Structure formats: C-alpha cells, structure tokens
Amino acid sequence: MQLTGAGMLRRTLGIAFAVLALGTADAGVLPDDRTDVLYHLYDGGGVEIDGPSVLVRKKVGNSVSFVGNYYVDMVSSASIDVVTTASPYTEERTQWSLGMDYLRGNTTMRIGYTNSEESDFDANTYAFSISQDLFGDLTTLTLSYALGDDLVGKADDESFERPLDRQIYGVGLTQILTRKLIASLNVETVTEEGFLNNPYRVVRYADPLKLVGYSFEPELYPNTRTSTAVGLRARYFLPYRAALEAEYRFYTDTWDVDSDTAAVSYIHPWGDWTFTGKYRWYDQTGAHFYRDLFARSEETNFRGRDKELSPLTSDTLTLQAAYEFIKDDGFEVFGFIKRAKVTASLNMLSVDYHDFSDLTAQGAIGEEPLYSLDSDVFQLYFSFFY
Amino acid sequence: MQMTTRRLTRMLLPLMAVVGLYGCGNIEPWVKPYERDKLADPIMALDGDPVSTSYIQHVYEAREGSRGGEGAVGGGCGCN
C-alpha cells in the first residue's frame, strides 16, 4: 500500500492560498504592481518538499488590478507514517490562482479562483471579499467568503471518488491606533463537509494475536468539521528605525482541537538590508477521536491516528535577511523596474508530540518513546516592483 | 446549524459595532494623513511578502491541526 501526501497537503488547500488570490486588505488603494519568484524547500521528519512559486500582479487602468500565482510542491516522503505503515513515495502537486481587485472610492472588491491538483486530489476554491476604508482611512474593514469544492481520490483505486465541500467566512479589521502603532483583528470560520479523513492512513489497535502486540485498520473521521480562529496582531515602530510585532491566535473546532499561537518578531533595517527575527510558539489539544493505541478493533465510532490531530507543541525560530539591489530613487535605471530585492529566510520548526509513539523505536506496546520532529524550511525569493 | 448561526453572529459583531459607530456621526481621524510617515515605512507593512506568508501558513497548516485567523485577509494599513 502506498501512503500518498494527500493527508499532509489536502487540509491546507483553499485556506492559506485562497487568501493569496485575494491579496491583502488595503481598501482605498490598489496593491503595488510586483512579481515574486520564490523557491521553497521543506526538509524534516523524512519528508522533503520543494518547488517554485511565482506571483505576478499588474494594474490595468486606475481601478483594476489582476494577480496570478503558480505554485508547485514536489514531495519525496519517507515520513514516520510512511515507514511504519506503507512505502516511501514521490508525487507532485501543482496549483494556480487568478484574482482581480476592483477599486471604487474607498471600497475594494476582490474575486479569486484557485485550482490545485495532485494524483489523488483535486481542489477548486472560489473566493470573494470586500474591503472598506473608514474614519479617514484609519480603519479597514474586510468581509470575505470562499467556497471550496474538492474531490478526494485514491491512487490504487480509480473508482474511489469522494466529495469534500468547504466554506470559509472571514471578518478582518485593521486599525491605525497611533502614529507608530497598527493592529489587526481577524476572525475566520471554516466549515467542511464530506470525506475528511485520509483514504490511506490507518489507526493502531491492540491485537494479542500479533507478535508485536498490535494491528492496523483504516481510520474513520466524522464527515463534518467547523472551526473558528481569532487572530490579533500589532506592529509598533520603535524609537529608532525598527519594528516590533506581537501576534496571538486562538483556535477551536468541533473535533475538540483547541490551540493557542503566540509570536513575536523584530524587524531591523540596516542600509540596503532588512533583517527579521521571529519566534513562534504553538500548542494544541488532540481531536476527541484521536488515540495513539486503541484498545481493540473498531473501539470507537470515529478513530484517527494522524499525528497532526494529536496533542502537540511546536516552536519555530525564523531568521530572514532581505537585500534591496534596486532602490526606488525616482530614476528608472533598469527599464520599468522601480525597486527590487532578494530575500533569504530559514524557519527552524520543532514539534513535540505528547501522545504519538515512535513505532520505529523499541519499547513495550503502548510504552514506545514519543515521536518528535525537527524541520528546516528554507525560502529564497526575488521581488520586483514596477 | 444553530451553532453555525451563533458563530456567524459572533463574527459579525465587530462589523455591526463599526457600522454603529459610523452611524453616530463623523469621527475625526486622530492620526492625520501627514502623521503616517512611520506607518508607511515598508518595515511596518503587515504583509510585505504575500507569497512567502502564504507558503509558510501552508507549512504550519500541514504540520499542525489548526487553520485560519492568522491575518492574511486583514492586512494593509490605509496609510498611502
């Protein structure tokens, strides 16, 4: 049996990237024309994922801006799930997005479409948002809605096809508080209905008939999930030219996954360079149907052993440096390009699982050592503004 | 369904509060446009690198059990 990357990739579709198609909320002005060419590499826990992402944004006239994005994940996986229950695999996911912003007075309307395809998963997301500047442009209010229409397949069974529908409701408020302080509040609710589990993943249950003491059977999830996330960010301009940002997010869902996320960033320009350091902490409870080891086969109505649904804590340290090699000094030395920069960034992500055993290690059944994960996430990208 | 309605109502409360405030009369901007030079500095952009931000959110959503609410929808500064 081959365990594909669907479990890792599918849940993220239509959420992180749907907002990319919509862009950011700055109601009274269209986003800058720009092109970004990014290379990304994720390496950790036996998984290597890399690929490009290219974004092009261009105004047409004074009130319309178009944006397009092409993104690829090339996956090579021998993760802990794969080595304990299946075979290593490689696969590719490609995604493209198109969006349009329409500005009228202090109001910006955005529409976006995203398509993502892997060998066993097809996702389409349609997004709409409207932003309004209020109170002399001190406040930007954004309402957003996205509809996801996905189809889950199975690599070794062409007849297997299950729908998954997703709706994302968002309210965002960005507020200038003082001459040096800006804050934003985001509330996002995601409702999903359909085939939510991974068609390949299995759960572990105690089986005295087996030498190792356990066996595996397919996981079975509820077919609905509703989550609400509330995020608060504030960025402050320090007495010298540098900025400090603090973030907090609370998350809860109907599978009993509750989480807290907190982060602090420091941004320091130096000549043509800008350095950023960030520390992020994340902690979650496990889903109510998650068990590392079930007492027997089909012990509960719903069952899962996805480590991302287990109780866990993660820490991330980010170091980033950007160098502006074409400055916006009023002269168009390089044709139509006004400004350009290159950015390198490294995220060091550590995850400690509090109830997910490492089955590759020795130990009595149910007393195996807990699994932990260290990953490096590297990005290198060029940004051109014109 | 009832739970979803309640959640939606809670979500829309900030909107209703803002619209309510707006209806009370004109609020004078307490930070004038000419006082927003520091907020217009690129280091104050809440999302200056949208491609990178989306990618790293994608990584977190793949490695963790939560999604949404991290602010890509609500960025911007209104300081131009």
Image (tube, rainbow, N blue to C red):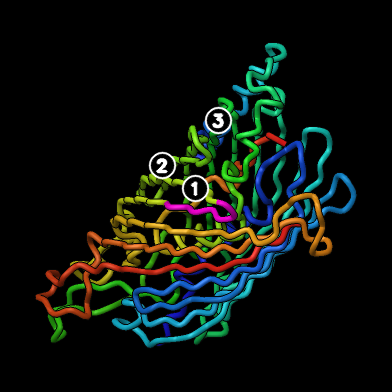
Crowd around label 2: few <14 · some 14–19 · many ≥20 (10 Å): some
The residue that appears at 40% across and 77% down in the rendered structure is A47
Residue A198 versus residue A173: which sits nearer the camera? A173
Name the amino acid, label 3: Lys
> Residue lying farthest top?
B24
Q: Where is residue A168 in the image (x, y as percent from the top left)?
A: 59, 49
Seen in the picture, residue A304 relative to A52 is either above or below; the reply is: above
First reached walking from the N terminus: tag 2 or tag 3: 3
Cβ–Cβ under 8 Å for marks 1 and 3: no
Please state which of the two labelled residues, at mark 1 or mark 2, is closer to the viewer: 1
Name the amino acid, label 2: Phe
Residue A352 versus residue A309: which sits nearer the camera? A352
User: Which residue has dot 2 on it?
Assistant: A250
The disc label shown at residue A268, or none: 1
Direction from residue A373 to residue A60 in the image, left or right? right
Name the amino acid, label 1: His
In this rendering, do the residues under marks 1 and 3 share a single chain?
yes
Look at the image and give the residue range highlighted in magenta.
Answer: A271-277
In this rendering, do the residues under marks 1 and 2 share a single chain?
yes
First reached walking from the N terminus: tag 1 or tag 2: 2
Direction from residue A228 to residue A279 in the image, left or right? left
Q: Is residue A98 visible?
A: no
Q: Could you say whether the residue bearing mark 2 is in a helix, strand or loop?
A: strand
Crowd around label 1: few <14 · some 14–19 · many ≥20 (10 Å): some
Question: What is the C-alpha distance between the residues marked 2 and 3?
Answer: 26 Å
